Image (cartoon, coloured by chain):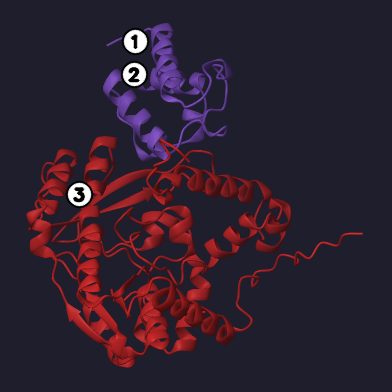
């Protein structure tokens, strides 16, 4: 399991880009992926399961904040904080 | 010059001014649809003791006469005991014949309980269906911000100790898929009796359940007519009072009656009391601005905007449930 922030961000980015039903070019690292509607409820649950399995983190109620998931950058930072 | 006919937004904008007139229109349309268009002789209604099925039973009894209506009570081992008692009281009020079809063994045959309990145990290894009750709920994240809701699993032991966890997606899907055997088994039973009598099946979802996707495709969403499918819950209650639905049913909190632990519809799906949900949904679907709605509801505009995008998302993500099978693969 990696602790390297660059690899974590790359993995998160690859995951998000393959999971959304949208043109990949539209999604930047700071695009608001939930506000823009790229992820629905099922997509969010699958994302959480992916992060837990891939990075060995545990998501709890207090983590379910927009600031932790709103963009590729936010998700990567959330994972890095959780791993540390 | 064009003038807007849209009424200013108010808290009671969805209240029906003339309940009697609306009721009569629904009854006349039911007669037209079932007797003339569908060419059936009467109707069967699954009666759960809840407000929606009660109003449907009452409307159906008025439309066809009680002798051409059959109420079917379909409990299973997780059903609330009150449901059957209230359904019987309702049927007596409208002089409708009822039969009881316990679907527990059918569900056991589908391995509904076993499949569900296996998934629950993957989240809580200590879960034992003999001593624990379980339910699925929504984590309160979705309404006031842009994150969609996440589901949680709650188990309650026989001493009332409660534990809950965010549900991993595989287990969530497995629990919902297994539980949906309940609604689909009920639909099969309704069609058995309907076909045996040459009757139609009356579906009981209301407007919110239809439009927000709170129904099981080919389960409670499987029916021939849905007389309250365009009514807000507040309006369903107005009809219930007018039609004389027993007080015990009107005063009961709407529940899902799907999981072994008590669970309100608000907790499971809607995240707002129905009275508020109705008003906001009306504003949303009739194009009122978030500013105007916020002013009337004494909420912040941002909160109402987030709520409206939540509604939009719910509508969009549940389109699949309302779609008929796609068949235009050849020709037109």
The shade of chain A is: purple
Whole-angstrom CA distance, mark 3 to mark 1, is 38 Å
Q: Is residue B23 above or below residue B172?
A: below
Please give the letter of the chain rendered in red.
Answer: B
Q: Provide residue B274's location: percent of width, then percent of height.
A: 48, 66
Please name the residue that numbered disc 1 is placed on.
Answer: A3
Q: Residue at x 53, y 20 (%)?
A: A23
Q: Nearer the viewer, residue B185 or A11?
A: B185
Q: Residue at x 50, y 43 (%)?
A: B316
Please name the residue that numbered disc 2 is placed on.
Answer: A83
Same chain letter for marks 3 and 2: no
Please name the residue that numbered disc 3 is placed on.
Answer: B178
Q: Are marks 2 and 1 in contact (CB under 8 Å)?
A: yes
Question: Does residue B95 appear in the picture of this structure?
Answer: yes
Q: Provide residue B237's location: percent of width, then percent of height.
A: 48, 78
Mark nearest the camera among 3 and 1 is 3
Label at residue A76: none
């Amino acid at each position: 399991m990696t602790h390297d922030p660059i690899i974590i961000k790359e993995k998160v980015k690859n995951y998000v880009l393959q999971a959304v039903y949208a043109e990949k070019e539209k999604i930047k690292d700071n695009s608001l992926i939930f506000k823009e509607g790229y992820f629905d409820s099922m997509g969010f649950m699958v994302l959480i399961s992916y992060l837990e399995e891939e990075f060995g983190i545990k998501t709890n109620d207090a983590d379910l904040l927009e600031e932790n998931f709103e963009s590729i950058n936010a998700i990567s930072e959330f994972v890095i904080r959780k791993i540390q | 010059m064009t003038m807007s006919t849209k009424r200013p937004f108010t808290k009671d904008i969805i209240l029906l001014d003339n309940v009697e007139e609306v009721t009569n229109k629904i009854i006349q349309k039911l007669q037209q649809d079932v007797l003339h268009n569908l060419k059936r002789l009467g109707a069967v209604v699954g009666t759960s003791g809840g407000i929606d099925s009660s109003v449907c039973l009452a409307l159906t009894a008025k439309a066809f006469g009680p002798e051409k209506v059959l109420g079917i009570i379909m409990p299973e081992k997780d059903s609330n005991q009150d449901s059957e008692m209230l359904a019987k009281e309702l049927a007596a009020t409208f002089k409708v014949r009822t039969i009881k079809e316990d679907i527990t063994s059918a569900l056991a045959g589908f391995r509904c309980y076993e499949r569900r309990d296996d998934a629950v145990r993957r989240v809580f290894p200590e879960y034992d269906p003999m001593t624990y009750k379980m339910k699925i709920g929504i984590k309160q994240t979705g309404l006031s911000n842009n994150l969609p809701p996440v589901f949680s699993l709650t188990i309650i032991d026989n001493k009332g100790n409660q534990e809950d966890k965010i549900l991993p997606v595989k287990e969530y899907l497995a629990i919902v898929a297994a539980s949906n055997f309940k609604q689909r088994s009920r639909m099969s039973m309704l069609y058995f009796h309907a076909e045996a009598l040459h009757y139609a099946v009356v579906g009981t979802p209301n407007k919110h359940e239809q439009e927000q996707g709170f129904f099981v495709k080919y389960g409670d969403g499987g029916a021939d007519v849905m007389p309250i499918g365009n009514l807000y819950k507040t309006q369903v209650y107005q009809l219930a009072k007018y039609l004389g639905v027993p007080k015990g049913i009107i005063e009961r909190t709407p529940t899902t009656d799907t999981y072994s632990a008590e669970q309100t519809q608000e907790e499971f799906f809607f995240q707002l009391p129905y009275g508020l949900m109705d008003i906001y949904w009306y504003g949303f679907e009739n194009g009122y601005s978030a500013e105007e709605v916020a002013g009337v509801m004494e909420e912040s505009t941002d909160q109402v905007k987030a709520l409206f995008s939540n509604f939009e998302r719910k509508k969009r993500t549940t389109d699949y449930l309302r779609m008929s099978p796609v068949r235009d693969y050849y020709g037109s």
